[in-house]
Image: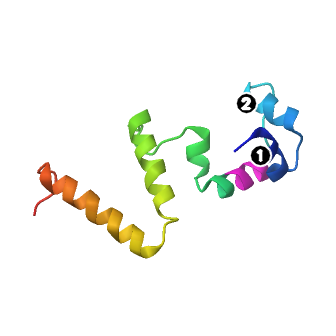
């Protein structure tokens, strides 16, 4: 998403988004809610909070992909789960 797209979504200007990105200004709670909805993430994801404190960048990347997969049609979701199950079974991570 471009800064211009995000600015339009949040009802601010592109320079405001740039200032947020470099830490010169913040966003309102209402803007945070809009941002989370647009990106399909939780405020904890945006604010860098974790429930376990164990989320590595690799884990976060995997979780984001799984969240995006929820947008797929049901048949595609089932196919993806089938592939994931097969991989996990082949590595002995889950039982057959």
By secondary structure, the bulk of the magenta-drawn segment is best described as helix
Which range is magenta? 29-35
Front one among 79 and 92: 79
Is residue 64 a member of the stretch shown in magenta? no
Q: Position of residue 67 (x, y in %)?
A: 48, 56
Q: Position of residue 79 (x, y in %)?
A: 33, 68
Is residue 33 covered in magenta? yes
Residue 91: which numbered mark, if any? Answer: none
Residue at image coords 46%, 51%? 65
> Could you say where residue 88 lies in the image, as x and y percent from the top left?
20, 53
Task: Give the residue drawn at x 20%, y 59%.
Answer: 86
Q: Residues within 10 Å of mark 1 (few under 14, many from 20)?
A: some
Q: Quadrant of the C terminus?
A: bottom left
Q: Quadrant of residue 58?
A: top left
65 left or right of 45 in image: left
Residue projecting furthest to the bottom: 75
Q: Is residue 6 left or right of residue 84?
A: right
Above or below, 25 relative to 82: above
Q: Residue 61: which quarter of the image?
A: top left
Residue pictured at 35% horizontal, 71% vertical: 78
Disc 2 or 1, which lies upstream in sequence? 1
Between residue 38 and residue 72, name the one nearer to us: 72
Q: Secondary structure at mark 1?
A: helix
Per the image, the residue denoted by label 1 is: 6
Q: Which mark is residue 21?
A: 2
Residue displayed at 68% across by 56% down:
38
């Amino acid at each position: 998403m471009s800064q211009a797209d995000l600015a339009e979504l949040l009802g601010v200007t592109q320079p405001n988004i740039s200032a947020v990105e470099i830490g010169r200004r913040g966003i309102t709670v209402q803007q945070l809610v809009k941002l989370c909805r647009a990106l399909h993430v939780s405020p904890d994801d945006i604010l860098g909070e974790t429930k376990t404190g164990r989320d590595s960048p690799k884990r976060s990347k995997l979780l984001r992909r799984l969240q995006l997969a929820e947008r797929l049609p049901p048949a595609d979701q089932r196919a993806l789960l089938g592939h994931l199950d097969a991989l996990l079974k082949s590595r002995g991570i889950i039982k057959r």
